[in-house]
Image (tube, helix red, strand yellow):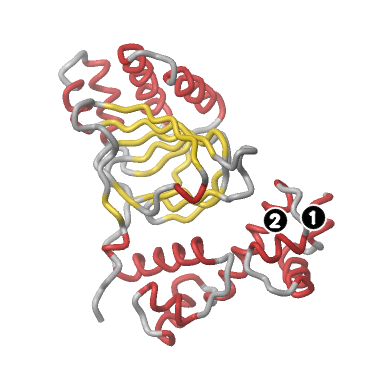
Amino acid sequence: MKDNLLPSIKYCVAPDLDNQDFLVHHCLFPPQQQITFHQHDALEISYIIKGSGKRIMGNTLGSFSKGEIAYVPSNMPHCWIFEDFDAYDDGTIENISIFISPKLLDTLNSFSPEICAVLSKIQHIDKVIVFEDATLIEMQKLMVLMLNQNKIEQFSSLVKLFSLIAANNEKGKIIGSKVTQDRNTRRLQEAHRFVLTNFHKEVNLDEAAKFVGMERSSFSSFFKKMTGQSFFEFLTLYRIESSAQMLLKTSMTVAEISSSVGFNDVPHFNRVFKKIKQTTPTAYRNS
């Protein structure tokens, strides 16, 4: 069978790094305009100011919420998929992303031994890391300050960010590693991506199998072997977890949420929700 999974990772050049060593990018846009699964040469530091949803970082699917800062090393496939309901009144989400050319680190390595030691740690980070506690707060402050700084001031702040990342990378939480070239792992990643982008509508096994590049029967057995769950058990759990977030973060009715996560029948949604969460949607919202 032809392996059609690699082209699904979109390669892109980080914006405007041909003539500068780093770029501070302030983004305000509707959730659906977020770029899909992609990778680029640049190192990236991204701060989610407004928005929440699911992210794929290399080989790992997870959830994110506002306030998170992630360090993404060079050539790490990644994407954020924002929920429509968690946005500003004008329908936009907000984040700050800093893109850094790897050449900048090579150039700075010729400076003082102190800077060289910091950059060496940065260059050896090969996983996606998010930060917590005092480190996170300090990084948030620096990234917001950079929006109103000139290039020299931004460079100084960037060096401070490098120092914080280098000093705390072992304390940070790893949320993703490089995508392995193992075919089965890539196929599972594709199955996760299919769920993320299609859970809100009617899904059938044939569509999922085709997306991954497998026959229906082979895909069903493969998914069960890799995860310990059937594909539809995984899909249902994802839908319920998404609905739980919507119950807590929106004023949408249970019926509206049920439809938004792919259930066509509200009583059925209520039964499934109670089975997984051990409580009704209404009680969960009020708890």
| Callout 2 touching callout 1 (CB < 8 Å) | yes
In the figure, is residue 84 to the left or right of 155? right
Marks 2/1: CA distance?
8 Å
For label 1, the residue is 284
Q: Decide which of 212, 23 is in the foreground and name it.
A: 23
Give the total of numbered labels.
2
Amino acid of disc 1: Tyr
Q: Quadrant of residue 284?
A: bottom right
**Residue drawn 68% across the image and 58% down it:** 243
Q: Position of residue 60 (x, y in %)?
A: 44, 55
Q: Looking at the rendering, which quadrant does residue 103 occupy?
A: top left
Residue 216: image tag: none
Report the residue at 38% width, 17% height from top.
Answer: 157
* Residue 237 x, y percent position in the rendering: 62, 66
- Image quadrant holding the N terminus, namely bottom left
- Amino acid on which disc 2 is placed: Ala
Observer-nearest of 178 and 149: 149
Residue visible at 49% across and 70% down in the picture: 227
Q: Please tell me how crowded label 1 is: few (under 14), some (14-19), or many (20+) other residues with Cα within 10 Å.
A: some
Look at the numbered disc 1 and give the secondary structure of its residue: helix
Which quarter of the picture shows residue 110?
Answer: top left
Decide: is 98 above or below 35: above
In this view of the protein, which residue sits in the foreground, 161 or 84? Answer: 84
Q: Position of residue 32 (x, y in %)?
A: 49, 51
Q: In this figure, which residue is indicated by the disc labeled 2?
A: 244
Q: From the top left corner, tell me how far across and down residue 182 is, in percent.
A: 29, 66
Local secondary structure at mark 2 = helix
- State left or right for residue 12 relative to residue 70: left
